[in-house]
Amino acid sequence: MTSRATVYNTLNWLKGVGMVKEVFEGGVVHFDPNTSEHHHFVCRECGKVEDVEGQLLGDLHLDVLPGAQKIENFELILRGLCVDCRGKDCSA
């Protein structure tokens, strides 16, 4: 049996070498093997996290922020109901 410390040390090593990306949502850390630039959809009911490719959102004009900020990358978290939970909730 592998210890919990070994699992977390390995995940942190994978993150350090760029093989996984850490996504922190709702007090829970997810390790995402998709390291390309993309966003996430989080289901408010079941907590499922799904990838959303960046080009689906179009141009967000983030280069127009006030001040002298220089954006190097960004990630959006979209929230709502996933397909499975929408099927259970007739009011959605």
Image (cartoon, rainbow, N blue to C red):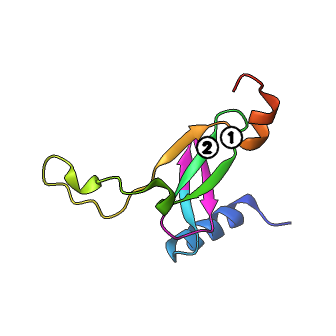
Q: Considering the numbered disc 1 on the image, is that residue within a helix, a strand or a loop? A: loop
Residue furthest out toward the bottom? 17
Residue type, label 1 = Gly
| Residue closest to the eye, 70 or 12 | 70
Q: Is residue 64 left or right of residue 9?
A: left
Q: Residue furthest top?
A: 91
Q: Is residue 26 visible?
A: no
Residue 2 in percent (x, y) is at 80, 66
Question: Up-down: is 80 above or below 41?
Answer: above
Q: Is residue 88 above or below residue 14?
A: above
Residue 28: image x %, image y %? 61, 45
- Which contiguous range is marked in magenta? 23-38
Q: Position of residue 58 (x, y in %)?
A: 42, 56
Q: Which residue is mark 1?
A: 47
Residue indicated by mark 2 = 42
- Give the distance between the C-alpha atoms of the residues marked 1 and 2, in whole angstroms: 6 Å
Mark 1, Cα crowd under 10 Å, few <14 / some 14-19 / many 20+, is: some
